[in-house]
Image (tube, rainbow, N blue to C red):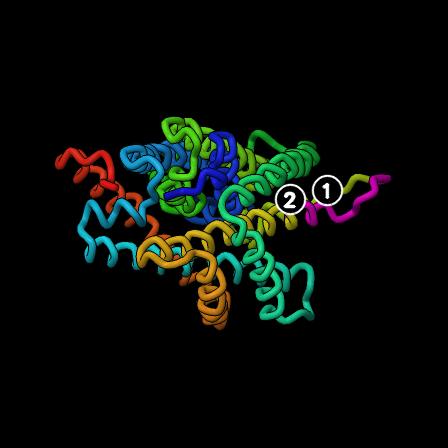
Amino acid sequence: MIHPNDRITTPQASVILANILLGVGILTLPRLLADKMKTPDGWITVIVGGLISFGFGLIMVKLCQRFPGKTFFEYSQFIMGKWVGRALNVGIIVYFALFAAYEIRDMSEIIKYLLLEQTPKEFTILVLMCVGVYLTSGGMNPIARMLELILPFTLVIILFSFSLSLRLFELDNLRPVLGMGLGPVLKGLPETWRSFAGIETMLFFTAFMSRPEKAGKALLAGIGISVFIHVLTVITVLGGIPFEQVATLTWPTISIVRSYELTGFFLERYESLLIVVRLVQVFTGYVIYHYIVALGISQTFNKEYHRYIFIVLPVIFMIAMYPKSMNQLNELGEVIGRIFLCIICLVAPALFLITLLRKISHVPK
């Protein structure tokens, strides 16, 4: 059962979800969409992907609301039976361990490439993981309070950075709208799914909400913020750089920020702001996933939670160091994306359907 002091409010739940979702696609989504779609209609795809994600997220919320104060790890064993539920839990734990490792390794690669070229990524990963362990040891409430401080700064920096690029913006770069029909929009949807990887955390932190009946509003606000920022990112990049060029850039968002100057201002490298935002958001995702892994082991096997925060640390570190190149890291990301789709499209809807058919609405004490 969730400790009363570890509850979070509805706005805090929205902030947690928004922070997780903002850490995924800000730097790379415009390139992925431009390369896949071959049209400037990526912003439409993002909106459609957000609506679909909200639909699946709502199923997860409705499932959690049938078991107030219980996480997925607890009610899955009741719905599916002890052993099948535990097997499912182990699979979910492995997924989040992979996701945590992917996030921390991705963050270390960006730091090494753009900031600390001579620093071994092993050292960077260990330092970041130790900070994450310190934060997760306090539980969900301290994590939520930290993210409440981070999100406003993130939004201000993003809006400020993009506003400076308005002089580069050309509306003709976004035309014609739907010039090739809906085909490219649908073709780009798989790329947007990656930007909404993280909504599955609603299966867990809904249990921590002081008013779980408002989880739907928290979901809507969190996805809404993410969709707005991702749409703004795609429009800003594609409006400033033709989509044919965007498809060839590794980090097109950084490229467009680098392409302008503001003389007399105290900061010269404005892309540093976006890099910092990206790193902070990825780190928040890592913290949440590390926390869920430790919580999952604790609740699945009825063990004390805090010891597993430290036990899973070397496991996540070894997974993070396993990819030998960026190509292998990207392959790991593809695997995580496929598991994510299974969770939101198959696992959560199947469990929700079972609860409806069996008229299950609570876990017996």
Q: Which residue is mark 1?
A: 260
Residue 211, horizontal then vertical, whole percent: 41, 29
Q: What is the quadrant of residue 220 in the picture?
A: top left
Q: Looking at the image, is 224 positioned above or below residue 260?
A: above
In the image, 132 versus 199, the foreground residue is: 132
**SS assignment at label 1:** loop
**Residue 336: percent from the left, percent from the top?**
38, 56
Q: Residue furthest front?
A: 365
Please identify the residue farthest to the left as the structure is shown: 357
Tag 2–tag 1 contact (CB < 8 Å): yes
In the picture, measured across the screen, residue 317 lies left or right of residue 122, that is left
Q: Residue at x 60, y 52 (%)?
A: 279
Residue under the point 47% across and 71% down: 318
Q: Quadrant of the C terminus?
A: top left
Q: What type is the residue that disc 2 sits on?
A: Ile
- Under mark 1, the amino acid is Tyr
Q: Residue at 46%, 49% (x, y): give it.
A: 32
Q: Which residues are magenta?
A: 263-274
Instruction: Tell me, yes or no, if residue 175 can be seen here.
Output: no
Separation of marks 2 and 1 at Cα, in angstroms:
7 Å
- Could you tell me which residue is drawn at 27 percent across and 34 percent down? 66
Question: Quick one: 281 or 254, which is closer to the camera?
Answer: 281
Residue corresponding to mark 2: 256
- Across and down, in percent, residue 215 comes to 39, 31
